[in-house]
Structures are given as C-alpha cells and as structure tokens.
Amino acid sequence: MSFDLASRCTAQKEQHLYRTRLNLQSPQTPEVTINGQRYLAFCSNDYLGLAAHPKVIEALSLGAKKWGVGGGASHLVIGHSEPHHELEVALAQWTKRERALLFSTGYMANLAAVTALVGKNDTVLEDRLNHASLLDAGLLSGARFLRYQHNNADNLQLRLKRSQGNTLVVTDGVFSMDGDMADLPTLCQTAKAHQAWVMVDDAHGMGVLGRTGAGLVEHFGLTVDDVPVLMGTLGKAFGTSGAFIAGSEELIEYLIQFARPYIYTTSQSPAIACATLQSLRLIEQESWRREHLNSLIEQFKEGAKHIGFPLMESQTAIQPILIGNSEAAMLFSEKLKQQAILVTAIRPPTVANGSARLRITLTAAHTANHVEHLLDALASCWKQMSETTP
Ligand SMILES: *Cc1c(COP(=O)(O)O)cnc(C)c1O
C-alpha cells in the first residue's frame, strides 16, 4: 500500500516535464538576482512595471499603517472594509459596469463565477486553449462541459446547438500561452444568437489594451450586454494581487449570495486594496506605459523577423517562440540563462503535447536596449541550437 510519489516524479523528469522554482533575491523588475547572479528577465506578467513602483509601494505601506495587514474574516462576516469597497467602485467605473466584486486570486474568481452561474442541466462552452483555472471551473460546475476549437465561432455555433439549460461561453481575452486575442465581436454575436452568456477572462488584457487600459472589451468597444461577465486579475498589469468580476448589479448580488469561493474565504489584505487603487490611477492616467510597451513589442517582432524566428500570431506583450519538443525548449532556455537572459520554457500540460515553447513577455519596465540584448542572445542561441540539433 503506497502512493509511490517518487516514481511519478521520476517519470516527469524522464519526459523533461519536471518543474523547479527559481528563488528570486530581488524585487520583480526586469533585472533580477538569483543565486547571487544578475539576469535580465523576460517572463514576468508585470506588464506595466507596477509591481515595484514607488507609489504603489507607498500606498501599500500607508494602507497597512491605516488598516492593518490581515483581512481578518470573510467579506460576509467582518472582513469587508472601506478600501475593498472603494476599489470595487473604482473598478466598476473603469470597466463601465454597475458593480465589481473583489477576489483574492484570479483562480478563485473563475471558480466562483462559473460554478455559481451554471450547474447540472446547464452547459458551459470553453475555448480549448483557455487558462487551466477556467477549465477546472467548468469541470467543477457539474454542467455539460464542451470545448470548442480555438477562437473559432463556427465551431462554437455547432456546440451551441447541442447545449441545454443556461449556457455560458467562456474565453480568455488574450490567450495566456499564445498571446493572441479572442475574436470577441464574432464570439459574442454567435453566443447572443443562442441566448448564451459570454464570460471573458481578461487577465492579460486588463491594464494593457484599450484606450484607458480597460482591456480587450474596451479595445473592441463592447458593452456589458455583449459580455455580461468580465473577469480581470490584479497580479499581472496591476502589479499587486487579487482579481475581480465586473457586471450588472444583479450579477454581483447573485455572486455574493451563491459563489462559494467568494463566501468561504478570508478577504484579501485591505492594504493590498489600497495599493491596487494606486495602480489603477497610474493605469488610467499614464498611458505612456502602454505606448512604450507597444513600441517594444514592435521592436521585438521586427527584430525576430529579421533573425528568421517562427513567431506566433500575437500583437501583445506575450511573444512565444514555438519549439515543439520539451527537451529542446528546456535546452534553449538553459542556453539563454548562460547568457544571463531569463525566459521560462512552457511545457505540457500547460500547453498541448508537442507544443513546448519559450514564452517571452515584454513589460513597460524594459528598455529598447533590453530588447536589443534579448534579440542578440536569441540569435546566438538559435544558431547554437541549429548546429547541435540537425
Ligand atoms: C494568471 C491567470 C489567472 C489566475 O489569476 P491569479 O490571480 O494568478 O490566480 C486566470 N486566468 C488567466 C488567463 C491567467 O493568465
């Protein structure tokens, strides 16, 4: 009688799927220290460089002085304080919705929304490449769970014909491992024609896309009528932590009553909410970060094209280089590390079998010189790789 954990871990190693963690000895900035060595990192989701911004740090420390550190209890008991309320109001205004509801993590926000909205006798339709938290939420909901082909509204329509009960169509806004954008106008139209609701997880669009940074929904000029359930995370472009769902008054009140991952957990630190409010102000008022990020994306794509890299269909800060085999992806990442460049290899099951990749992310805290440096290192490692693997 044994769980035999060790042999399962060994099997992961043999398939080049074993995961280890880096121990960061510096804040989350482009230049990081690990094991006393300096690296230039291109794998953070801190897209606007706000995680270590002085004003955000100050808001956190002032928030802690005023409100203490711990949330103390769940929101429905006595853990809901003024900074949480203020942040919810500000997020609702920013996303042009009646209400917003704050969660401690994006994973929980997704579990909460999907499992509260659909159950037995309902249907949830998800893009094949959706984030793991959305797929888990769909399975946990107990609803009929169907996946449609990536970003394919025709395929969604076929699935919609087989749906029963209340139907929720769920998609990433910007796909986390590919960087491409969901074709929301078409997906929303298709869903509407079948009286289905659309939920968008805009973890990688919020703060970065749209005129005021309000994400992919703003980018396409869609309303709460097109996308009734909008989810955003605060741990990426906001540089803090947590997440939110924004929608109608009715939706938010319903979630407060029925969403178990909202009800049965301690509220996030009110000091974090203070920091996030400060981030939101920077996101709304200082559009130069988005402009700078876009110019770095252009620079990277141009440079990569020049070297002859197989880039994917992405206009966003996520610029993956598809390698295929997990061992080769690990080797590429290791070679870059030897040149003091940090890019993580993303392997199955995070991505499909045979589609391991280097997931390069750019942020507004990078400079044009940083990107130049990355391109040089990529070119030289790419050359080494093609010499050793015919
Ligand atoms: C990161 C991410 C999440 C999870 O958010 P956390 O706040 O990190 O738990 C959910 N969905 C997508 C698409 C993500 O990239």
Image (cartoon, rainbow, N blue to C red):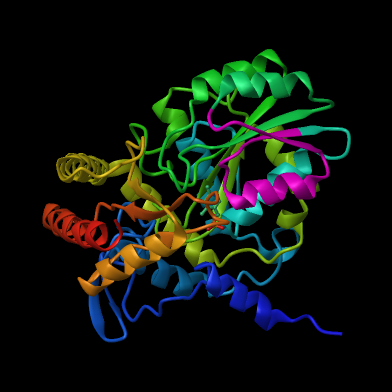
Name the residue located 37 percent from the left edge and 39 percent from the top edge.
213
Name the residue located 44 percent from the left edge and 56 percent from the top edge.
325
Residue 339: image x %, image y %? 20, 71
**Count of numbered circles in the view:** 0
Residue 269: image x %, image y %? 55, 67
Q: Is residue 372 above or below residue 144?
A: below
Name the residue located 48 percent from the left edge and 25 percent from the top edge.
183
Is residue 130 or residue 215 the one in the foreground?
A: 130
Is residue 23 or residue 205 the one in the foreground?
A: 23
Report whether residue 384 is seen.
yes
| Image-based side of 363 in relation to 242, left or right | left
Quadrant, the N terminus: bottom right
Is residue 154 or residue 187 the one in the foreground?
A: 154
Quadrant, the C terminus: bottom left
Residue 380: image x %, image y %? 16, 60
> Residue at the front extreme?
390
* Residue 126 lies in the magenta stretch: yes
Name the residue located 41 percent from the left edge and 68 percent from the top edge.
60
| Image-based side of 386 in relation to 207, left or right | left
Q: Is residue 144 above or below residue 240?
A: above
Place residue 337 in its image quadrant.
Answer: bottom left
Is residue 82 or residue 325 the one in the foreground?
A: 325
Q: Which residues are magenta?
A: 124-151
Report whether residue 99 is seen.
no
| Image-based side of 304 in relation to 260, left or right | left
Residue 112: image x %, image y %? 71, 49
* Residue 217 lies in the magenta stretch: no
